[in-house]
Image: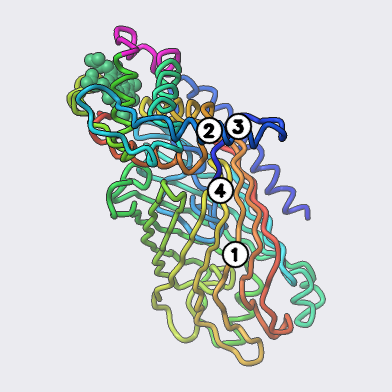
């Protein structure tokens, strides 16, 4: 819990810094339509909760800088995840992000060693996103979506679980990896629908929390992600997301099989500076043998503040 | 989605409905201006008809001219003329049957150095004016969606 509090504290400091910067920029600021700033993913990029969108985070226009800080908490049957991060949108063209994840294994690892009660896997993610073509907001008369290219460099700081898996499975799991993705986002303003598809090339096992690659190889594999949202009101969106996950780790004794992750979310934008997202998530199995082979279902809450 | 009407005491609702029916039945098709094609009343109904659209647009122009961010663009502009042209244009893009008689968007805004943020500020004023007029969300989104692509001709 101390760790989570620490992330929260740092996130709040970042948010405060964002507000100060906002004051300085207030003269030149009038942003995009509310809600088109999106929310923050668990990996820090702007988008839905699970998957990045082609939109550049924040409400900055082509001549402005936008940015935000977020804190996200996820609690499933057997695990808890806390993520804090900051993101900067530059001239509605480039997005930079940094996020820290703390994945609390709670009681899951006790059968391996009682000392691992409450063990937390930590991972840092640095993201870059560049808008390539299209404009999701203004291109209402064209079929072309807004398309962006992104990368996420992840550094897993774990020194316990990944070495254990390497010795159990025969090595090959790395602690660092870089995902590449293409996202296409289309906003249908008239019916109030936002659709996003993301093609990700990754080596990650469970988002990288269980490292990258494995004994069977170190090749990139494609994964597909989608978001579909409906704008109920200008300040309220509901939607679903899905994300395929086919990590390569295989071990009959541990059951490391991954499954597709889903969520159903409600995002509320009380102002252009804040958003609150609540979701019901199903992350699929995570180390099934130690968690009764059940899918990890639970709640997701995320608070974002920015300018 | 229902049109927002001013709240009525429930007893007077049937009477008001009857009155509305009579008015609708008795009103001949309104013309925007002489020389304009006939209006498509159904397309304009969510906007309070051509008259309602015109009133909303006047309030919108008022907001824009008072907006500290973009008001200066309009200081030498004749508000009534602008509101009339905008009403025509809104009616046309909504499929209301009007013919827009003003300049093209590129011509009208050339050299003004309108920026993205100015455009968005104006769009926000429009949304505020539509909310004030009681337009339903979907009707607001329809007009905004049809104007959004003009950004390419207006913003430098
Ligand atoms: C979707 C957005 C917009 C639409 C639909 C629109 C539409 C129009 C129309 C129909 C006219 C009259 C053209 C004529 O005189 O024949 C006009 C003029 C004008 N617009 Fe816009 N406009 C938009 C955005 C803007 C913005 C963002 C600004 C500046 C902040 C702006 C500033 C002006 C000014 C100053 C005039 C008067 C020009 C003159 O009388 O010479 N407009 N606009």
Label 2, secondary structure: give it: helix
Q: Mark 2 points at which residue?
A: B20
Whether residue A137 is in magenta: the answer is: no
Q: Mark 3 points at which residue?
A: B16
Q: Residues within 10 Å of mark 2 (few under 14, many from 20)?
A: few
Magenta part of the protein: which range?
Answer: B64-80
Which callout, 3 or 4, points to the residue nearer the camera?
A: 3
Q: Nearer the viewer, residue A185 or A202?
A: A185
Q: Mark 4 points at which residue?
A: A232
Q: Work out whether A179 lies above or below A185.
A: below
Instruction: Please tell me which residue is depicted at 71% across the width and 35% down the height of the picture.
Output: B10
Instruction: Please tell me which residue is depicted at 48% across the width and 77% down the height of the picture.
Output: A213
Q: In which quarter of the image is the N terminus of chain A?
A: bottom right
Q: Name the residue under label 1.
A: A263
Label 1, secondary structure: give it: strand
Q: Are marks 3 and 1 on the same chain?
A: no
Whether residue B65 is in magenta: the answer is: yes
On whether ligand 1 comes within 8 Å of the CB at mark 4, the answer is: no
Residue B62, numbered circle: none
Residue B80 occupies which quadrant of the picture?
A: top left
């Amino acid at each position: 819990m101390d760790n989570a509090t620490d992330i929260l504290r740092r996130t709040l400091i970042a948010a405060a810094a964002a507000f100060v910067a906002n004051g300085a920029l207030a003269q030149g600021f009038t942003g995009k339509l509310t809600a088109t700033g999106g929310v923050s993913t668990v990996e820090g990029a702007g988008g839905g909760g699970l998957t990045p969108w082609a939109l550049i985070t924040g409400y900055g226009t082509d001549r402005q800088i936008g940015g935000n800080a977020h804190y996200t908490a996820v609690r499933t049957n057997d695990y808890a995840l806390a993520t804090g991060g900051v993101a900067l949108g530059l001239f509605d063209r480039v997005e930079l992000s940094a996020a820290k994840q703390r994945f609390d294994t709670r009681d899951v690892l006790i059968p391996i060693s009682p000392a691992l009660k409450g063990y937390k896997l930590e991972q840092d993610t640095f993201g870059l996103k560049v808008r390539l073509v299209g404009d999701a907001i203004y291109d209402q008369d064209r079929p072309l979506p807004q398309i962006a290219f992104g990368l996420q460099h992840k550094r897993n700081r774990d020194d316990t679980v990944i070495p254990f898996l390497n010795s159990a499975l025969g090595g090959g799991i790395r602690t660092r990896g870089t995902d590449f993705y293409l996202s296409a986002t289309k906003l249908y303003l008239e019916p109030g629908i936002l659709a996003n598809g993301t093609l990700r090339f990754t080596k990650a096992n469970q988002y990288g929390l269980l490292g990258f690659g494995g004994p069977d190889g170190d090749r990139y594999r494609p994964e597909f992600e989608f978001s579909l949202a409906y704008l109920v009101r200008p300040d309220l969106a509901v939607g679903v997301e899905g994300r395929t996950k086919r990590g390569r780790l295989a071990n009959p004794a541990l059951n490391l099989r991954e499954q597709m992750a889903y969520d159903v979310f409600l995002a509320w934008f009380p102002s252009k500076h804040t958003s609150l997202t609540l979701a019901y998530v199903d992350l699929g199995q995570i180390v099934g043998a130690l968690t009764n082979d059940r899918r990890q279902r639970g709640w997701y809450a995320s608070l974002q503040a920015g300018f | 989605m229902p049109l927002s009407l001013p709240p009525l005491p429930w007893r007077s609702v049937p009477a008001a409905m009857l009155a509305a029916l009579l008015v609708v039945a008795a009103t001949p098709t309104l013309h925007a201006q002489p020389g304009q094609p006939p209006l498509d009343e159904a397309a304009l109904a969510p906007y309070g008809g051509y008259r309602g659209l015109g009133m909303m647009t006047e309030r919108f122009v008022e907001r824009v001219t008072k907006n500290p961010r973009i008001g200066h663009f309009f200081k030498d502009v004749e508000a009534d003329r602008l509101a009339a042209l905008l009403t025509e244009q809104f009616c046309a893009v909504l499929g209301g049957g009007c013919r827009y008689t003003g300049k093209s968007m590129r011509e009208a805004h050339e050299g003004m150095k309108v920026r993205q943020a100015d455009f968005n500020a104006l769009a926000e004023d429009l949304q505020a004016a539509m909310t004030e007029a009681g337009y339903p969300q979907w009707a607001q989104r329809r007009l905004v969606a049809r104007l959004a692509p003009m950004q390419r001709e207006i913003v430098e």
